[in-house]
Amino acid sequence: MFYILILLILLIVLFSYKYAWWKPAVDWNRPRVLMYHMVRDHINGAKFNKLRVKPAEFEKQVAWMKAQGFHFVTMHELQENWGKHPAKTVAITFDDGYLDNLQNAYPILEKYQAKATIYVVVDRHDRDWSTYKKAHHNSGELAREPKLSDGQVRFLAKSGLVEIGSHTMTHANLDKLTDEECLQELGQSKQQLEQMIDQLVTSFAYPFGIYSQRDVELAKQAGYRNAVTTKEGIDIAQPDFMQLQRIKISGKDSLFAVKCRLKLGQRGL
């Protein structure tokens, strides 16, 4: 009995450490920005299943947010109306431009009238951009994932629910580029996406979340008005709109974990 009690206490401690469920919520007047990649079933033995949120789980998450009275906005709307949004404002974002964002995520967004922003890589087909960050990731896994066609990007942009943002031309690691190369990645992607969808593109996501102050300034120079990072958290009342934090949603997260993350802006303690 004693050992069972000790084990139970340890489990409670571990659970509390992992989820920090007991901590008070970050002020709900501070908007949350969620970070997704794919909405599709997992692949057995795949390296990047954490980037794949199952459609059923994604619907649970969106349905719960809707039921809890969350207010869904695009990143452009978030930045334009900062400080005027109601409590529980949330911006759903997707990186890269995967086909499942249309096939699996969009019907759920439409069902619950939830807006989102998709950061599209212009030269996105047949590229395994994980290799640009770490050589040992060269599995071809991400290259094999179907990406949105230009026509599908246009459809989403005209849907009224989805904002198209830029994720550079080639999902480049900006840290490895010269100033000229970096500005080209930023500027050309913005220009080509604007031509593609016949709308202004003012939102940007740093590939891999790797960037420096130089890249922030070049993104401003290219004409972006807001940019998201992979730094996890919930921004303060007066944030730097070119370095916005996000809450990462993993394909391995339970609904309870997602609820805790929305509450606190981070994983556990």
Image: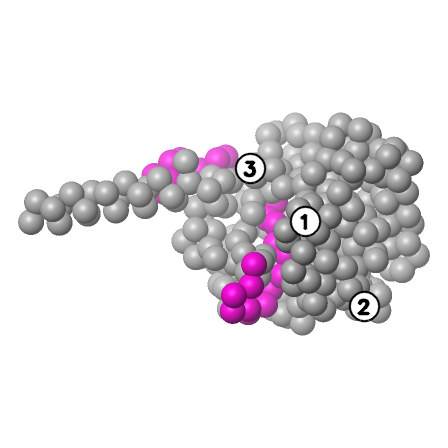
Q: Is residue 201 left or right of residue 161?
A: right
Q: Is residue 117 visible?
A: no
What residue is at 66 percent from the left and 37 percent from the top? 244
Could you say which is closer to the camera, residue 7 or residue 237?
A: 7
Of labels 2 and 3, earlier in sequence is 2
In contact (CB < 8 Å): disc 2 and disc 3: no
Q: Secondary structure at mark 3?
A: loop
Majority SS type along the magenta span:
loop
**Residue sitting at 87 percent across and 55 percent down?**
193
Labelled disc at residue 135 = 1
Q: Residues within 10 Å of mark 3 (few under 14, many from 20)?
A: many
Question: In the depicted view, which residue is nearer to us: 193 or 198?
Answer: 193
Image spot of residue 82 (x, y percent): 68, 37
In the rendering, at what x and y percent does residue 114 appear?
63, 59
Q: Which residue is mark 3?
A: 233
Q: Earlier in the sequence, mark 1 or mark 2?
A: 1
Q: CA distance from mark 3 to mark 1?
A: 28 Å
Give the amino acid at mark 1: Ala
Is any atom of residue 12 visible in this view? yes
Q: Nearer the viewer, mark 1 or mark 2?
A: 1
Observer-nearest of 215 and 172: 172
224 sits to left or right of 12? right
Of the two numbered discs 2 and 3 in the rendering, the one whose residue sits closer to the viewer? 2
Residue 206 to residue 54: above or below: above
The residues bearing labels 1 and 2 have C-alpha atoms spaced at a distance of 27 Å
